[in-house]
Image (cartoon, helix red, strand yellow):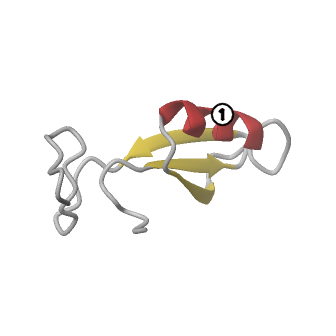
Amino acid sequence: MNKYQTGVYHVHLFDRHGTRQKTLVVRKGLTAAHRKGEKKTRKPPFASYAITRVLVNSVDNAEPWGPRDAGA
């Protein structure tokens, strides 16, 4: 799978100074991404997190909000 596949979530982890330390890729949805961020920030070195989602990847043919082709 592609890290920037349409629809995946990225959990960006930051230290207490706001410097990004690590990014995790979560494919199971927003709730799973939120849980992962909460778990990782319970103790140092991570102090906070932000979640982003790949809405469009120009070379990814996936259309998660469109109809699915049964033959694909």
- Tell me the quadrant of the picture where the C terminus can be found: bottom left
Looking at this view, name the residue that lies furthest to the top. 31
- Residue that mark 1 sits on: 35
Amino acid of disc 1 = Arg
Residue at the location (85% across, 41% down)?
43
From the viewer's perspective, is 35 left or right of 33?
right
User: Is 12 left, or right, of 15 in this rendering?
Assistant: left
Q: Quadrant of the N terminus?
A: bottom left
Q: Residue at x 58, y 36 (%)?
A: 32
Toward the viewer: 40 or 29?
A: 29
Q: Is residue 55 left or right of residue 14?
A: left
Image x and y of residue 20, in percent = 60, 55
Up-down relation of residue 20 to residue 51 (above or below)? below
Name the spot of residue 28 as percent of width and height, x first.
Answer: 51, 43
Could you tell me residue 61's position as x and y percent? 18, 62
Residue pictured at 17% horizontal, 58% vertical: 71
**Near-viewer residue (10 or 12):** 10
Q: Residue at x 14, y 41 (%)?
A: 67
Q: Nearer the viewer, residue 13 or 32?
A: 32
Q: Classify 22 as above or below 68.
A: below
